[in-house]
């Protein structure tokens, strides 16, 4: 059952009936804005914390209907779920103030000793909790999945958002960043006394799950999707929003067609959903690309689609890292990516794919053309280069770093670090 089917009454029943035995001495709270963050990004951290003897609490807006949430999967994790009506928008101050008050009650009730916060609003509220409980010794870990201030960002980002991060850094015990640009920017922030700045290569890439498929698996998956074996299959994975920028791929395909190129064999599979789905479907019609575009929506077993692609397109305006691109590369699928601080961590032009400006329609058309015209021998070589380019992001490495981070937070709680 997916939480997208739930009503507010279902959430109330969940909160009132789903309880586990709790060891009140070792409590940690993972705080985010959206409910699906746990299943997508935090399962490995949950395992690490449980191995360390912690009871893990997870607080997010469980009534948010914009993402997938597997209730049974979460129950298997043994995590204590708390519905807090956090809003994604930082401008919904009244709602988020109520959420903050609820979080105060939660922290007190379960005697939380460590808070690990994520996402923009979750990160703000988590560090404000650090300020509120300053005298109680609660330690705050904040993972920045991409600062909103960065090289080339709009002035508002590099002024207001930088000021916000600089102010909240005073209540942050451990700041975790996932790319080198953010690591350099993190050095400019003054953390809480004794605080630590940590770089981690992503959030843990499962290279066993995201593996190169056999020729037989590719054929079977394509047949199941209705994709011909001789068709050129483009895939993008991500929420349909302005940042993910999928529309530029539509424009690139239209450009190729309007220049007289035969694109009759090209199929573009869009995996994801979001507020802009209607707009994208309208754009498909306006550009006359109905025969070329397949809207798959959210897909739980994304490997079945991604693994049989010929090219993964990742045209985001900005990324902290970009797990969809890493997962594509792990499966041996070359990537046509926009140039940003996240993709610079792993993209190498001509080695594992192609790099374009996020506004460069011609550049994405060129990338599609190059990959489409690639000979079989070179395609096989690039497949191996793709896989090798992301080995350092394997979860076995990131898990060790996160284990060290949690140990450091634990020592801070115990007073071993002043």
Image (cartoon, helix red, strand yellow):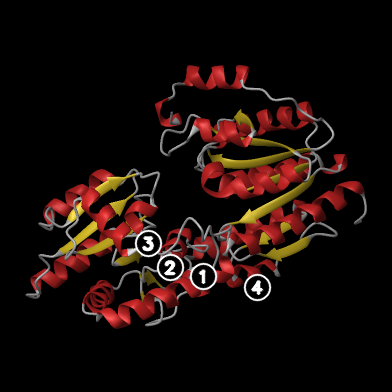
Q: Residue at x 60, y 59 (%)?
A: 395
Real-space Cα distance between discs 2 and 1? 7 Å
Give the residue at x 67% y 22%.
19
User: In the rendered image, which residue does mark 2 sit on?
Assistant: 329
N-terminal-most mark, 3 or 2: 3
Residue closest to the eye, 358 or 59:
59
Q: Are marks 2 and 1 in contact (CB under 8 Å)?
A: yes
Q: In the rendered structure, are the residues bearing label 2 and label 4 in contact, judged by CB atoms less than 8 Å apart?
A: no
C-alpha separation, residue under disc 2 versus residue under disc 4: 26 Å
* Image-quadrant location for residue 182: bottom right
- Per the image, the residue denoted by label 4 is 184
User: Residue 7 sits in which quadrant?
Assistant: top left
Crowd around label 1: few <14 · some 14–19 · many ≥20 (10 Å): many
Residue 388's x, y, as percent?
49, 74
Looking at the rendered image, the quarter that the C terminus falls into is bottom right
Q: Which mark is residue 50?
A: none
State whether residue 280 appears in this view.
no
Where residue 10 appears, as percent x and y from the top left, is: 49, 19
Residue at 55%, 49% in the rendered image: 41
Picture coordinates of residue 55, whole percent (x, y)? 74, 36
Write down the residue under mark 3.
Answer: 213
Real-space CA distance between mark 3 and mark 4, rounded to the nearest whole angstrom: 37 Å
> In the rendered view, would you say 341 is above or below 217?
below
Of pointers 3 and 4, the one earlier in the residue sequence: 4
Q: Which residue is mark 1?
A: 390
Is tag 2's residue or tag 4's residue first in the polypeptide sequence? 4
Does residue 367 appear in this view?
A: yes
């Amino acid at each position: 059952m997916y939480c997208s089917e739930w009503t507010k009454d279902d959430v109330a029943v969940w909160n009132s009936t789903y309880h586990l035995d709790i060891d009140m001495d070792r409590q940690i709270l993972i705080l985010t804005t959206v409910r699906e963050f746990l299943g997508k990004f935090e399962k490995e951290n949950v395992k690490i914390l449980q191995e360390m003897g912690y009871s893990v609490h997870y607080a997010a807006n469980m009534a948010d209907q914009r993402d997938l949430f597997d209730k049974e999967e979460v129950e298997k994790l043994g995590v204590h779920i708390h519905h807090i009506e956090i809003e994604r928008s930082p401008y919904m101050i009244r709602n988020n103030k109520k959420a903050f008050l609820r979080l105060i009650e939660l922290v007190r009730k379960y005697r939380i000793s460590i808070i690990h916060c994520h996402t923009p609003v979750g990160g703000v509220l988590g560090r404000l909790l650090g300020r509120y409980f300053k005298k109680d010794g609660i330690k705050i870990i904040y993972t920045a999945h991409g600062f909103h201030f960065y090289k080339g960002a709009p002035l508002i980002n590099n002024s207001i958002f930088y000021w916000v991060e600089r102010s909240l850094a005073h209540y942050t015990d451990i700041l975790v960043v996932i790319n080198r640009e953010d690591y350099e920017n993190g050095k400019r922030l003054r953390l809480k006394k004794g605080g630590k700045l940590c770089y981690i290569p992503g959030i843990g890439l499962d290279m066993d799950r995201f593996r190169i498929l056999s020729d037989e698996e590719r054929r079977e998956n394509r047949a199941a999707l209705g994709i011909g074996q001789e068709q050129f299959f483009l895939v993008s994975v991500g929420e349909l929003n302005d940042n993910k920028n999928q529309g530029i791929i539509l424009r690139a395909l239209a450009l190729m067609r309007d220049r007289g190129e035969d694109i009759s064999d090209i199929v573009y599979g869009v995996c994801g959903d979001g507020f802009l789905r209607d707009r994208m479907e309208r754009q498909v019609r306006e550009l006359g690309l109905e025969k070329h575009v397949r809207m798959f929506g959210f897909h739980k077993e994304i490997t079945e689609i991604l693994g049989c692609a010929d090219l993964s397109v990742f045209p985001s305006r900005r990324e902290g890292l970009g797990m969809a691109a890493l997962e594509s590369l792990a499966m041996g699928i070359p990537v046509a990516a926009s140039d940003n601080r996240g993709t610079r961590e792993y993209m190498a032009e001509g080695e594992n794919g192609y790099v374009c400006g996020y506004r460069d329609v011609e550049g994405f058309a060129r990338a599609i053309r190059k990959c489409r015209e690639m000979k079989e021998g070179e395609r096989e070589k690039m497949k191996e280069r793709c896989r090798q380019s992301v080995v350092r992001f394997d979860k076995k490495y990131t898990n060790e770093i996160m284990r060290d981070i949690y140990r450091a937070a634990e020592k801070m709680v115990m007073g071993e670090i002043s």
